[in-house]
Amino acid sequence: MEKLLSKGEDLFSQGQIEQAEKCFVEIIENNPTCKEAYNDLGVIAHNRNELNRAKTYFQQALRIDPGYQEAINNLADIGRDKPALIEDLPSDMANNKNISNQNIAIVNPFDNKFNQIYSSYFSRQNDVRIIKASNSKEILALDPIINWADIIYTPWANEPLIYLSNKKSNKLLVSNIRSYEIFFDESMKSVAWDKVDGLIFVADHVRQIANEKWPQQLKAVPQTTIYNSVELDNYPFHKKNHGKNIGYVGYLNAKKGIELLLQCINEAVKSDPEYCFHIAGEFQGERFEHYTKHLISQMSLEKNIIYHGWVKDIPEFLSDMNYVISTSPWEGCPNNIIEAMACGVKPLIHNWRGAADIFPKELVFNTIEEFISILKSPDYDSSVYRNYVEENFNTEKQLPKIENFMLSLLEKRGETTKSKSSGSSLNLKSWQEVAEQKPAESDEKPKSDESINFLQPLPQKVQIVNNRKVYTVDFCRDKKVLHIGCVDSGMMKKRIAENNYLHHQIYKVAKKLIGIDIDNDGIQLLKNEGYDVETVNVEIDKERLIALTKDVDVIVIPEVVEHLSNFGLFLDNLCSCHFDGEILISTPNSFSYRITEILSQGVELVHPDHNCYFSLITLTTILNKHGFDVTRHLMYYWPGDDLFGQKFEKVINQSPYQAEGIIAIVRKK
């Protein structure tokens, strides 16, 4: 694709417009996600004064990559000449701005769903690292991250923010305040607020109380309110109606209004003994556990309450619920209610301050009598609840608000995001000038140059992943997947026993999963367990590989290529398949600190079946030679609490190129 793109642009510069156009059209026919080809066709259309057509091409390029600067500039040039042509563009496209090519550190004391949400969004055009800092040891180890980052974002205003704000740093520092933080006096007093560039509150009532309680600390800090959000694709919608199952999601403690919850349960059961309350959560504090179980016994509610413990798969839990109840006396912007509404479940919400501002008033109750009234009300519309979440708590709308707030802070500091190379593409101004020029003639013969540059530049920024299996599973979520190398020879039974078998983990989240491997014994074992697998030698069985790739969305090849005798031959077979989706390849890093550290001891840390090593450069080189482009580089490592693990983590914070292994996301050229 790159060669054809370069050829087209060369033809354009020589004035051979029709031939250039044919090149770009051919690219799109084979790769409809090539933003550069759409952009270049837009330039040609503009050259012919076909402005509507040019606008359409530039818009398509921006749909593929909203931050593609060449298309943004070209569209803006059309707008300056013919403003009416872009009046109908969506505002986010007409005023397209993105944070790009930045190092963004997300420092979170908790290992929760927000990490994945923020990382997925910002890593589209930036290098993102998720850093867990929940104790003093982890917090004190943040210095390398401070040096690396351009932007530091803390989803909670607690201990990490205290440390980061008190360090002498000119990095953009942005933090959330979710709710509880404003009542911790010592923490609020310890943050150096003059070093915090911006605050994001999750609700207006939290923001109002925070500024009432801490006026001197917060008066000079730029602020905004942005609700929490959910990725709707992760919350399947079910059309529901009145029923008898009422869910509760969260810890069981005083902060969640246990006393009121029990009274609501009692009154509901009095009105209809068939109501059943399902508790998805754990007790916090023995006092509340003793109190709750005692009162349940006294009110004879044992048959109406089912404890599910701490539930990891909330959408699955909610699929059986007709209602979800929240009895908290205080909340910020509670995700348990948002997630329930996203699944079509009717929420029953106690009127903590701000509840009726965030959620529909008709779902909020003050008294137990009002709770029963809402529960028994004939009004029940799952689509309304889902639509409310789509409109108010959708990551596709909320995360751009966070990005725009950060952009405004950068502009206030007089900074702009770094320019990001988007590959070869035409620009209306520069390429029109070039097209009008004739190549200068020269009698000078090209000089022969037999020297070779052995210093190859590494990718300037790579994302660090602290668990390649989790990343691989997320990559496969809700997709049709071909897993090449599914057996894990020599380790499979151990992995299955430890619940650490990658193929099974992918199976649980994928829409469809096919597994192939050369290990026939392992394949037979998996077939007996009911998996869709077969024995295939990917180095020689090209036809079978072509057939298996016809109906999949992605291909994953984790820790396989180092076992192959002829990786290039396999790539040629894969390139011949009619598959244009993303491929994930992971492999050990030849320059891993774990490997190089022990070489001086006269031993090498390597699997006895490995045939080769790859570095970032050599992996990219062989992929390019056999028809593939690397669209994203990542490095992975396995965190460890021992002394070596701590030392390893410090090393890769300073030099990610010494991480355990490489993950490459690739596509056919």
Image (cartoon, grey):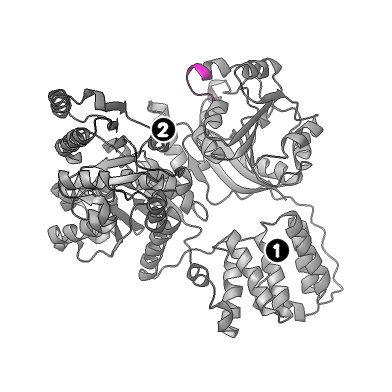
- Where is mark 1, residue-wise? 37
In the image, residue 294 sits, relative to residue 3, either above or below, namely above
Q: Earlier in the sequence, mark 1 or mark 2?
A: 1
Q: Is residue 499 magenta?
A: yes
Left or right: 160, with 300 as reference point: right
Amino acid carrying label 2: it is: Lys
In the picture, the disc for residue 354 is none
* Residue 445 colored in magenta in the image: no
- Name the secondary structure under disc 2: helix
The range drawn in magenta is 495-501
Give the alpha-carbon distance from disc 1 to disc 2, as whole Å: 46 Å
Residue type, mark 1 in image: Ala
Across and down, in percent, residue 304 comes to 25, 27
Q: Find numbered disc 1 in the image and state the secondary structure of the residue it sits on.
A: helix
Compared with 177, 563 (above or below) is above
Instruction: Please give the name of the residue rendered at 80% of the width and 74% of the height, measured from the top-left corner.
Output: 17
Residue 218, position in %: x, y?
Answer: 20, 61
Number of other residues with Cα within 10 Å of mark 1, as a class: few under 14, some 14 to 19, many 20 or more: many
Picture residue at 20% right of the left edge, 35% below the top: 265
Q: Nearer the viewer, residue 508 or 218?
A: 508
Nearest to the observer: residue 114 or residue 98: 114
Q: Residue at x 63, y 69 (%)?
A: 58
The quadrant where residue 614 appears: top right
Q: Nearer the viewer, mark 1 or mark 2?
A: 1
